[in-house]
Amino acid sequence: MARIAGVDLPPNKRVEYGLTAIFGIGLHTAQRIVAHIGIDRSKKIKDLTDEEVTKIRKLLESDYRVEGALRAEIAADIKRLIDIGCYRGIRHKISLPARGQRTRTNARTRKGRKKTVSVYRGPRGERK
């Protein structure tokens, strides 16, 4: 089993698809890495030699930000937005969509479960 950037890659997947298990590497980047190193695209991760795994690991360390470093950078960027008090920072702070999506309906992923709001009835029980 190949372990790159602290992630165990799925052994039965082809190399370019298996590399996408690493945070920060999508399919396009994985294809570029495989082409740059010269690995056969149809090769599975379990069939990689130690030398090929080492080449991938060195390339990722030198040219790409992945996993912990990328997560830290993203967190720092969001913290900066919150600190300067810009619109996007405020939206991040109160856990609402930051890119212009509607929130009257939808947005359940960011807003969480529905909160039922009861109707205020006055002192005699009539609806206001």
Image (cartoon, helix red, strand yellow):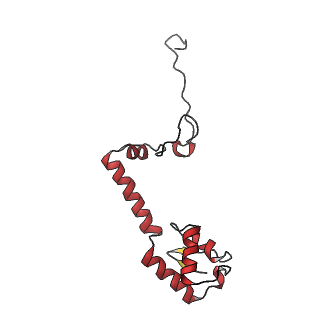
How many discs mark residues in the rendered view?
0
- Against 28, is 106 above or below? above
Residue sitting farthest toward the left: 84
User: Can you give x and y, in whole percent of width and height, for residue 22 in the image?
Assistant: 54, 70
Closest to the observer, 119 or 95: 95
From this viewpoint, is residue 8 visible? no
Query: Is 119 displayed left or right of 88 in the figure?
Result: right
Res 101 visible: yes
Tell me: residue 97, above or below residue 27.
Answer: above
Q: Nearer the viewer, residue 114 or 123?
A: 114
Q: Position of residue 12 (x, y in %)?
A: 68, 76
Residue, far top: 124
**Residue 77 x/y as whole percent:** 38, 56
Which residue is depicted at the point 56% across and 86% down? 52
From the image, which quarter does the N terminus lie in?
bottom right
- Residue at point 39%, 62% (across, down): 73
At a point 47% along the width and 82% down the height, the residue shown is 58
Q: Residue 105's x, y, as percent?
A: 58, 36
Q: Residue at (68%, 79%) from the top-left corner?
A: 42
Q: On the rendered structure, is 10 left or right of 65?
A: right
